[in-house]
Image (spheres, grey):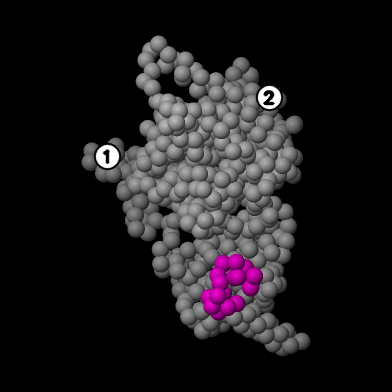
Amino acid sequence: MLKQCEGSHAVAEAVALARPEVICAYPISPQTHIVEGLGEMVKAGEIQDCEYINVESEFAAMSVAIGSSATGARTYTATASQGLLFMVEAVYNASGLGLPIVMTVANRALGAPINIWNDHSDSMSQRDCGWIQLFAENNQEAADLHIQAFKIAEELSLPVMVCMDGFILTHAYERVDMPTQEQVDAFLPPYVPRQVLDPRDPVSIGAMVGPEAYTEVRYLAHAKQMQALELIPKVSREFKEIFGRDSGGLVRPYLLEDADTVVIALGSVLGTIKDTIDEMRADGISIGVLGINSFRPFPVSAIRRALSHAKRIVVLEKSFAVGIGGIVATDVRMAMDGLDQRIYTVVAGLGGRNITRASLHRVLRMAMHDQLEGLHFMDLEWNIVNRELDRERQTRRSGPIAENILRDLGQTKSNVG
Amino acid sequence: MFQVRIHGRGGQGVVTGAEMLSIAAFLEGRHAQAFPSFGSERTGAPVVAFCRIADKEIRLREPVMQPDALIIQDATLLAQIDVFSGLETEGYVILNTHRSFEEMGLGELARRFRPERLVTIPATELALKHVGRNAPNVPMLGAFAAASGLISLESVASAIRQKFSGKVADGNIAAATEAYNAVKAAREVAHAQAV
């Protein structure tokens, strides 16, 4: 049924339709509305046979999720930013143990400096944690991906992170076609675990593995992700059969066929990029965009296939690896190895900085004329950067950078925003 | 695509106002997107929220920089921030005050826009009267519906019912209706004078 609702609400409803048995979460902006919504639904008895566990931290949230998933319960949690970092040790254990937990990451920047706004630094910090990472372009897809995530996770015995842009999606009201319980039940069978802690048939889970077999266990983790490259498109097709719409999959092309310049991006910024590309196409510019829905596993072949004809690629990413540059771009370079294409990295939208059509037009036109540097920081204020660098050259005790810059901007911490 | 920017202060229901506007447009079969400018959710702090309305899927996620309509829920913001920034010359302005644009010292600015699209409405008074608290967001929507014709009062009322229930919903609907009728009446008077 079509409804106009907040992204967080749509996700909470979608998770409820997947019939979770344990939900354990610790609230953190911008994830809060999702778990509040689920808490209310459990309390009101709208989700049958489900326990909502209030935990004292994100580390506890993932630890409880591991425990409940190991007993065979369909398990959900959600977090963001510092919360994701706080649970990291358990995040790696969940994937290492092969427990099909589904977790929403309401993408948010990482501190320091503390920042509650959106970028992809949190999910990207966990790109090697062994979880599948799916990115949602809009709230419809965010809702749909959660339903798909349980199916993918349980079929592979692998946890899935559904990444959706914090605030931009979680707090946005837009149209969402909510599935019915009958549709979701037809799509998502009850969870049949490969391993289960059951007192009637006791096993132990989590053995120490030494040099004799650690490589093999780790290789199998990789092999499962390679299986996911087959499964994710299959689940997306099955989803379309029942729900009648395209959602998920590995990559999503837009006006790619004849495009000399192709932009690659993840998440909600794809919408703004598509609108910009429509305007550029109207000006006769040969440009398209490829959205990456599945970042882990990274769809190397699908990307190489989609981009083989492109003359240049602009990877626009909402995070970067300090000391080297683009994270997504590095993976794209690997996918395009041996092909003669210029690959640019544009870092944009850090800590909630708006990504506007005006800035995209400027940067993409520079790229089109091959006038863009390899690593470009969109809308970076050089005078602010240079002022701080000058200060550091002139004074040994130059003071804390964030406070210096806010003072330069005439702002204090209390009135930012 | 029609773009609305709502200015107000934390506690005045700015974000809820944008959400209800999007619901009202949705109920009329339109695509709509509402989102807040995040991070300033403190009572009394300036808050901005946005709503886009269109006949096809809305993909754009940038903030509304060139609004077709401005809803200004708190007139004290006029001295603090440039609320009129980017307003289209054909744009609508709904300002919460019992005074006129001229009396607000906005006569110069008002002459740049179409006079029949500049509307003042004492929304705080209407909210206090019907809802009992300073929540001018709903009467502002009633005034916007009357001034723009973009959404019907019935859709605004349905949107209110989706957000609130019981007495609060009834009060808000009464406030929206009075604001709607006041703007309609003022426009008829202006029209009669023009003829």
Residue at 63% over, 73% down: B157
Query: Where on the picture, by quarter, is residue A341?
Result: top right
Q: Chain of mark 1?
A: A
Secondary structure found at label 2:
helix
Q: Earlier in the sequence, mark 1 or mark 2?
A: 2
| Mark 2 nearby-residue class (10 Å; few <14, some 14–19, many ≥20) | few
At 47% from the left edge and 63% from the top edge, which residue is drawn?
A: B47
Q: Chain of mark 2?
A: A
Q: Which quadrant of the structure image shows residue A190?
A: top right
Residue A140 is labelled as none
Give the labeled residue for mark 2: A305
For the residue pair B42 and B154, the one nearer the viewer reads as: B154
Amino acid at pointer 1: Gln
- Seen at 68% across and 55% down, the residue is A2
Q: Which mark is residue A394?
A: 1
The quadrant of the picture occupied by the C terminus of chain A is bottom left
SS state under label 1: helix
Is residue A204 among what the camera can see? Answer: yes
Q: Is B34 a magenta residue? A: no
Which of discs 1 and 2 lies nearer the camera? The answer is 2
Camera-side residue of A394 and A318: A318
Q: How far apart are the two marked residues, 1 and 2, measured between alpha carbons?
A: 52 Å
State which quarter of the image contains the N terminus of chain A: bottom right
Q: Is residue A366 left or right of residue A99?
A: right
Magenta span:
B156-173
Categorize mark 1 by other alpha carbons within 10 Å: few (<14), some (14-19), many (20+). few
Residue A316 or residue A187, whichever sits in front: A187
